[in-house]
Image (cartoon, grey):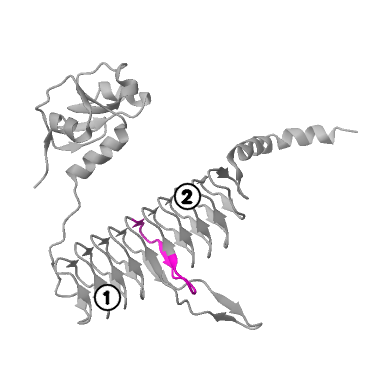
């Protein structure tokens, strides 16, 4: 049954301050300023979108204290410290995670040696191999493959077609989007002089609490020790993580990032889309790396980097501006006797 919340309930949930409007108005959803209906709430994060507010049908709007004094509108205004965070909190209220209830589809194969909590949901065409352990509250959507010896923690969600390979470990509240592969062989070969000799990859992958893995992302198992994704890491779609990589807590990566083997990435880093990182490097805590950056050396903690090869962002801006002037500079050089 859909959830609802009156405006005064919204204020209480968010710890906000109400200005104007009818506190008893019932809210059924969150929407954009342009598309919101009269029983929906919206949010304003910037003065740039103030014009949209004047034409909006939203019953209420979330705004920051910094801009509320400049607003004149018909909607109820709820002042909050961070409108975007408030929006996220409301979305989670209106769209809570589904709870597992122990549904097991008839077409799922579950090995008799698997240890699965009673309330775990297992959808059609899933395969659960020998020695698997799945803790309570976890849900597996259609076509998931859970290989031998895998341990999946509490309240995890595996979307359709996820593959968890041999002996990998998922801690609690891990979310894996459709088609991701966790624990595929690392890219390890030795050249004999005539062919590439495959090196057995005998480590596994460990995903800690509250990790989210995007669709069709691949994380390779370690060659000897494990590939580790620490607590709270969020990986977008189509990312490649090589063997023995260690990704620090709360780091986020946008789509198509590639991390080569045995690299260590610190806590709270941000990697833009299509960033490439060479192997056996160390990226310090809190680094921000712009999209399409090529990282070929260690990066100091707290830096902001861009370019190929990666350099401090300010240096990259100056260099890029100079590159645009090269034709003009070259003409002047050619005129020098």
Q: Position of residue 90 (x, y in %)?
A: 22, 39
For the residues bearing labels 2 and 1, Cβ distance under 8 angstroms: no
Identity of the residue drawn at 78% across and 34% down: 331
Of badges 2 and 1, the one in the foreground is 1
Identity of the residue drawn at 40% across and 50% down: 250
Left or right side of 156 for 284: right
Q: Position of residue 57 (x, y in %)?
A: 19, 26
Q: Position of residue 329 (x, y in %)?
A: 76, 34
Residue 132's label in the rendered image is 1
Indicate whether residue 166 is drawn in magenta.
no
The numbered mark, 2 or 1, whose residue comes first in the sequence reads: 1
In the depicted structure, whether residue 204 falls above or below residue 280: below
The part of the chain drawn in magenta is 211-227
Q: Nearer the viewer, residue 159 or 169?
A: 169
Q: Nearer the viewer, residue 21 or 16?
A: 16
Identity of the residue drawn at 21% across and 78% down: 109
Residue marked by disc 2: 273
Left or right side of 196 for 117: left
In the depicted structure, whether residue 198 falls above or below residue 56: below
Q: Nearer the viewer, residue 137 or 105?
A: 137
Indicate whether residue 217 is drawn in magenta.
yes
In the depicted structure, whether residue 260 falls above or below residue 15: below
């Amino acid at each position: 049954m859909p959830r609802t919340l009156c405006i005064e309930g919204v204020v209480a949930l968010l710890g906000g301050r109400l200005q104007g409007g009818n506190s008893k108005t019932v809210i059924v959803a969150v929407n954009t300023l342009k598309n919101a209906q009269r029983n929906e709430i919206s949010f304003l994060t910037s003065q740039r979108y103030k014009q949209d507010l004047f034409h909006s049908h939203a019953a209420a709007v979330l705004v920051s204290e910094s801009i509320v004094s400049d607003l004149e509108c018909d909607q109820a205004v709820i002042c909050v410290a961070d409108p975007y965070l408030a929006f996220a909190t409301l979305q989670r209220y209106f769209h809570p995670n589904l709870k597992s209830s122990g549904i097991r589809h008839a077409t799922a194969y579950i090995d008799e040696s698997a240890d699965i909590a009673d309330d775990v949901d297992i959808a059609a065409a899933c395969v659960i191999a020998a020695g698997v352990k799945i803790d309570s509250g976890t849900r597996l959507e259609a076509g998931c493959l859970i290989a031998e010896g895998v341990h999946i923690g509490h309240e995890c969600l595996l979307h359709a077609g996820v593959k968890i390979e041999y002996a990998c470990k998922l801690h609690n509240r891990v979310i894996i989007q459709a088609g991701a592969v966790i624990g595929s062989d690392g890219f390890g070969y030795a050249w004999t002089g005539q062919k590439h000799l495959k090196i057995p990859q005998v480590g596994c992958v460990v995903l800690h609490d509250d990790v989210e893995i995007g669709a069709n992302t691949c994380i390779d198992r370690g060659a000897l020790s494990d590939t580790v994704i620490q607590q709270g890491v969020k990986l977008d779609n189509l990312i490649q993580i090589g063997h023995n990589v260690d990704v620090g807590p709360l780091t986020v990566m946008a789509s198509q990032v590639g991390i080569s083997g045995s690299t260590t990435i610190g806590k709270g880093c941000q990697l833009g889309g299509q960033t490439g990182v060479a192997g056996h490097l160390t990226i310090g805590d809190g680094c921000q790396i712009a999209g399409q950056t090529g990282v070929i050396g260690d990066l100091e903690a707290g830096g902001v980097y861009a370019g190929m090869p990666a350099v401090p962002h300010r240096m990259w801006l100056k260099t890029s501006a100079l590159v645009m002037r090269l034709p003009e500079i070259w003409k002047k050089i050619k005129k020098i006797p």
